[in-house]
Amino acid sequence: MKQFYQIHELAKLFDLCPDTLRYYEEKGLLHPVRGENRYRMYGIQDVCTLNIIRSLRELGIPTRSIRAYLERRSVGETLTLLDREEELLRRRMAELEAALREAQNRRSRLELYRNAAAGRVELVQEAERPYVFLEKDIILEKEIDFLLKKLEQRHQDYLKVIGSQCMGAAVDEDSLARGIYNHFSRVFFLTEPGLPHDDVLPAGEYVRLYYRGPYDRLEEHYRALLAGAESAGRRPAGPPLELYRVDAHDTNLEEEYVTELQMRVEPAQTDA
């Protein structure tokens, strides 16, 4: 039985590159001896140590902590390390379960809205909806994705552009009054109750329609929304909102985009 192994033999055994073994030596984790021609030679203890290093690195434990453990290793130290491992694994399992719920919620959203009836104006009751937003004097349509990413970065602990949360933008009312339909006043994410938020969309009656395809036909869809509100005896009580139900993060095909155009309304005044 061989007592020592060369660096390429150990690297092949653990599917590592030799530079990784040299790095572990530099950090004081491995201690090869020098053989003939000054070649590094690794013994059985190095094989055992490398098994430990591999196991701890897979858990994301930093090299300085691994070195400290290796230097004072005992059954008691190993039991303490196992406590830490279990806590790390429980945390990782919770993160994976949260990621699974996020993926399932995103699937549910896509399956729901890909079949939404387009062009039909409806009156709906909405509960109060908390949201976070980023506001500017004028936001052009082409800026929306950039600003949504900026907003995500501000709230990255609980928001993701590619996730289950609904993203949207509020049409700028002053621009709308001048017949300009591609100016927006704020971008936003709807958030879950109990999470931090900047404001709430008021509860109440809203008129809505879904439309498919690109965003350059907002005027046409907004006029249809207004006509539907008027025929139902309602008038606008807030700015139009675009809610991006299926967008470029979900598909390359513009014809598959689904946007919900929504506006809070109130009963129209009638002549006495």
Image (cartoon, grey):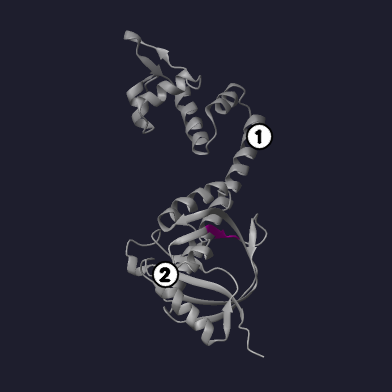
In the image, residue 235 above or below residue 145: below
Residue type highlighted by circle 1? Thr
The residue that label 2 is drawn on is 218
Residue nearer the viewer, 229 or 55: 229
Residue nearer the viewer, 97 or 271: 271
Question: Residue at image x 52%, y 34%?
Answer: 56
**Badge 1 element:** helix
Question: Residue at image x 65%, y 59%?
Answer: 199
Magenta stretch?
186-191
The percent coordinates of residue 160 (x first, y second) are 51, 53
Question: Residue at image x 38%, y 60%?
Answer: 248
Earlier sequence position, callout 2 versus callout 1: 1
Residue 189 highlighted magenta (yes or no)? yes
Q: Quadrant of the N terminus?
A: top left
In the image, residue 105 above or below residue 122: above
Numbered tag placed on residue 80 in the rendering: 1
